[in-house]
Image (tube, coloured by chain):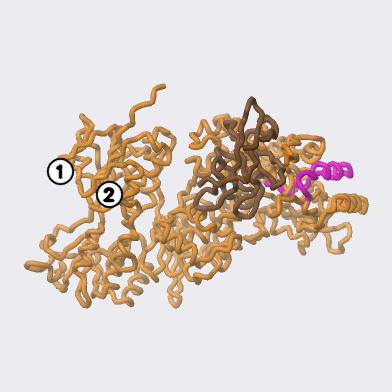
Chain colours: A orange, B brown
Amino acid sequence: MMKKNKMRLVVIGNGMAGIRTIEELLKMSADEFDITVFGSEPQPNYNRILLSPVLSGEMSFKDTILNDWSWYEENHITLHTGKTVTKIDRLRCVVETEDGIVAPYDRLLIATGSNPIMLPVPGIDLPGVVGYRSIADVENMLGMTGEGMRAVVIGGGLLGLEAANGLSLRGMDVSVVHLCEWPMERQLDKVGGGLLQGALEKRGLKFYLSRQTEAILGETSVTGLRFKDGEEIPADLIVMSAGIRPNFALAKSAGIHCERGIVVSDTMQTYDPKIYAVGECVQHRGQTYGLVAPLFEQAKVAANHLAQYGRMRYEGSSVSTKLKVTGIDLFSAGDFNPAAGDDELLLQDAARGVYKKLVLRDNKLRGAVMYGDTVDGPWYFQMLRDGTDVSEMREHLLFGQMHLGDSGHGATSSVANMPDSAEICGCNGVRKGTIVNAIIEKKLFTLEEVRAHTKASASCGSCTGLVEALLANTLGGDYSAKPSKKPICGCTEHAHQDMQKTIRELGLKTIPEVMRALDWKTTDGCHVCRPALNYYLLAAWPGEYVDDSRSRFINERVHANIQKDGTYSVIPRIWGGVTSPAELRSIAEIAERYEVPTVHITGGQRIGLYGITKENLPKMWGELVEAGFVSGHAYGKSLRTVKTCVGSEWCRFGTQDSTAMGIQIEKMTWGSWTPHKFKIAVSGCPRNCAEATIKDFGVVCVDSGYEIHVGGNGGVKVRVTDFLCKVETEAEVLEYCGAFMQLYREEAHYLDRTAPWIERVGLAHIKRHIVDDAAGRTALYARFLESQHYSQDDPWKERAEGKEAHEYTALATIG
Amino acid sequence: MNWIQVGNLEDIPRQGSRVVNTAKGEIALFRSVDDQVFALNNRCPHKGGPLAQGIVHGKRVTCPLHSWVIDLESGSAVAPDTGCAHRHEVRIAHGVLFLEVEAGVCKA
């Protein structure tokens, strides 16, 4: 096929939405387009969200630039700044500026943003009345500020309050005029708004609430303002912040269908399919957006379609808000005004200045308002977007994630209050100050960028929540919103969520097939997506899919655990932790023969032999297999161990034969591959010596049967299991165990332990599938047993007999 | 240049790696998905991890110890990490691999 001529893409609007779309597009197909950008403002693309810190003096304009001039040059983008496009000729496919520049397009992207609403009152045109939307507005305001001068901000919304706070920090005497009874009524209920008002009054702001402006006073410049009730207040500067209005005049004049904004479809196309629109100027499914997170999601979708991948749809965004006023913590998301039938959970502590309100409908979060303590905002927001069933955690919900037994970060969650020296990432020794500096200096936006630059949360990932909280805290809440569907890695736009379903529905059977069908951007993926795809395929097609060892992490590829010096550990399976003198003798003799430097008893009741060279692995396994052992899979995302206590066979408290139960479970589950490692324990009585309540699947024997517990974790994030149900027979324990593991294998994302998986989907979901739906449980159990048919060949025996010998030998020895 | 025959292309799995032991230490040979072969010292510039045990993707390998990504053509760590696993020349002639084992170089 002949190479096409480059398509011409014209972008109207040099702001965050338009430029983000170009960035996304360049990532996908750098050479497909000749790009021309028109911007009315004279500056390159800057971060509009940071106008408030510039106004308050906490940042300089330079710090807010996202793409400097050289970025446009390096990417061969023709940039016209200070040029306003005044005409779109859709017949000839050209745009024209007021001063006569004409640019033809094959595709047009409109990202004209929004304008501040200027109230239609007398005096609105007087010098001294400014909007608050652009850096020019800020410069304008700064030119009029001065100690002791009086500013009035009309509009007590998010932006208005940020402007008021900024002007106050510049030494002005600031009043806020607002139409409603309390500030930020779109984000806060009355109580929250009252608390906010109090805090801002303490900082010296004055409020005029439930007031309507009738006229702005002054002859040659502003001198004051008159309310409808006749009262007048003096002012040297008036800031209009009564809302924004999508700027769609240009699109409308070109005959493009507009309502409250430019109407776009799920592909971000306007009614003219050659013309796309993103950002604050658009109306999508009846909604307009004024926060940055939705704009970025729209940009991704628009770029995907411009690049002719045609895969993604924009389905609307849930948004959360955070006020960027230093020292005031406020968070809101969703719909927090309860409708009939909704439940409202409230926590109010006037002395500590803490207020939280959650609105629930059908056991799902619909909205949240938090003031004073916003640490759990991102957690609530995630559950809100995921539609998590919260019925099981309802009693504790208001007290936050920490209180839930914590899937995360213990008492250290209040990142804002932590000192700069506090260690955030224990694996890589990264301190809070280092992360915050990197975010600011290197202008990092995403978790991945922070990982790349600081290594924080790049190893075990347990501090991911903290790092995200730091990002949110440093950049302002607009960035806290991680997309609810996060791509697996940079190779793809696709998230873990849909992978299993898509693979099954499209009948995809190999990694290259998946990559082709889903438009992978790299030829053969990377170390992040390939192991994930290999797992999903393995889970989807047991017995059929041929495991791709090249897409396995080294431990799973060579069936041993790599150590820091490149040697390996060998841990044979000891069923239920029960061994014998003969077994111990064989292990001892083998350990001596191979001069094993360290023999260690593991936490899972096994014996670990450490410091084995790779060449010796197959030989050593051969001898272990001869002695009756199989692989302990201590290296895999798989069933690890079933830990037991001695139970009723010996213990005077034992109620059931927990050891035999454990061995039965281990014989059934060994060799199974799971999204992450999976640990089981069986305790013979509620004294729980086998620590079953911090395992992925725990059985606690009682006199009348067996309690089943799920979703525990004893690692970095200690989490006690949730009680699932009680059963009466050993056969039921096996069935529930197999069914639970299968549900986890089919539903969890690769590298999710059961604890975060359960917290995401909710325990009620697990109960529905495992406890309530007997037929479903039986089917899950049957699928589990079916796939076990193919996975209980001992990998050590196979390799001792010569399979994959090239893994264990050098290619050559020379010199 | 001193070319030494070390084996055949078919001895290295696609997206895989094998090690050649030399007097100066191990050299890892990588075969990309499109059958190009690269050679680097088998030591990650970060903490000496055995690169030959990593996952090979595109013209890159990810170290098994701490997931540093090393560019196979240059031997350099992919930004923002910095460092270099020294690179050696490899030639494939009729499916036979020849390795050049001089000091190894760093390409900027």
The local secondary structure at tag 1 comes to loop
The one nearer the camera, A656 or B87, is B87
Verify whether residue A327 appears in magenta: no
The local secondary structure at tag 2 comes to loop
Q: Is residue A619 left or right of residue A329?
A: right
Q: Position of residue A392 (x, y in %)?
A: 58, 57
- The answer to whether residue A753 is seen in the rendering is yes
Report the amino acid beneath label 2: Gly
- The answer to whether residue A21 is seen in the rendering is no
In the rendered structure, the residue with mark 1 lies on which chain?
Answer: A
Identify the image quadrant of residue A790.
top right
Q: Which residues are magenta?
A: A612-638
- Which of discs 1 and 2 lies nearer the camera? The answer is 1
Q: Say which quadrant the N terminus of chain B sits in.
A: top right
Picture mark count: 2
In the rendered structure, the residue with mark 2 lies on which chain?
Answer: A
Q: Which residue has dot 1 on it?
A: A98
Q: Is residue A693 left or right of residue A529?
A: right
Residue at image coords 66%, 29%:
B96
Whether residues under marks 1 and 2 lie with C-beta atoms below 8 angstroms apart, the answer is: no
Q: Position of residue A739 (x, y in %)?
A: 68, 43
* Label ID, residue A113: 2
In the displayed structure, would residue A526 be above or below residue A134? above
In the displayed structure, would residue A7 be above or below residue A639? above
Report the amino acid beneath label 1: Glu
Identify the image quadrant of residue A700.
bottom right
Identify the image quadrant of residue A338.
bottom left
How far apart marks 1 and 2 lie (CA) works out to: 19 Å
